[in-house]
Structures are given as C-alpha cells and as structure tokens.
Image (cartoon, grey):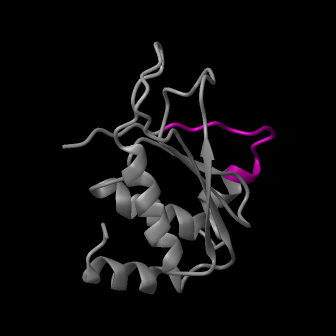
Amino acid sequence: MLLGDADRTAVRARWKALAGPVSATLTTRRRSSLVAPGQPECRSCPTAEALLSELGELSPDFRVEVRQVDGLPDAGRIPRIELGGQAKGRVRFVGLPDGHEFGTLVDAAVAVSGVPGALSESAMARLQTLIKPVHIQVFTTPT
C-alpha cells in the first residue's frame, strides 16, 4: 500500500467532489527479465500502476485502464497518465506523480470530472473567445 490512512481519507473526501466519472489511462511498460536495445527500463511504472489502482479503490467514479506499450515512438515518455471526464479537454501527466504532483493529480481528476472552475467571469469571457484548441504544457521537477 502506497497511501497511508490519512492520505486515503483525504482522497476519499476529495473524490466526493467528483461531478461525474473520471477515466485514468496509464500507459506503461511491464518489467521484463529481457533487456531490449533501445527500450529503456521504466522503474517508476509499477509504482504508478499501484498508485492508480489504490486511487481507483477509493471511488467507483475513478476508473483506471492500463495500456502496455512497446516500440512506440513516444514509449520513452512513460509512465503516462491521461485523465478525462465530462469537462472538455484532457490532462496528461508524464512521469510518476508523487510529492506535490500527487495533489495536482487528484485536483486535476476533480476538474476533468466536470466541476465548474474557479476562474473569474472576465477570465471565462476571454477563454470563450478562443477559436481553436490550445495545447498547454506545464513542466515541474522534483525537489
């Protein structure tokens, strides 16, 4: 078990805010005793899978799907977690969301479930003027 009792209680409380089901798709590579040239080992993939599994146990509205990759062009960008729900757009995490990123993962799940955002009316009005999709990337580093 990765999450302690206090973390599990906090996530359960946060999951009560889900406005609808959330899908969490984990793209990973299982550990193998074989080493293939050009296929780097994913040391954090088992931990990411265990973490999402625990989160899925805390609410029936948080649904986890695991996809295995081998040889794809972006296979080096794993583990990768993609969240989707009733809200438009998707949120993707590359790497293991631990430390401060764990809270961001939980908050992102609530946001994609369809919970209205806390943006000001003027910010919402400006967003309504967008005429094509916007791709936003946020980079963080562990401290």
Vertically, is 13 above or below 104?
A: below
Q: Front-most of 77 and 131?
A: 77
- Quadrant housing residue 123: bottom right
Where residue 95 sits in the image (x, y, percent)?
Answer: 41, 41
- Quadrant housing residue 50: bottom left
For the magenta stretch, what is the residue range? 127-137
Where residue 120 sits in the image (x, y, percent)?
Answer: 56, 65
Query: How would you classify the magenta stretch by its main secondary structure?
Result: loop
Vertically, is 19 above or below 38?
A: below
Number of marks present in the image shown: 0
Q: Residue furthest right?
A: 131
Q: For the point 75% across and 43% down, which residue is it? A: 130
Q: For the point 51% across and 38% down, which residue is it? A: 29
Where residue 54 sits in the image (x, y, percent)?
Answer: 44, 71
**Residue 87 within the magenta-colored segment of the rendering:** no
Quarter of the image with the N terminus in it: bottom left
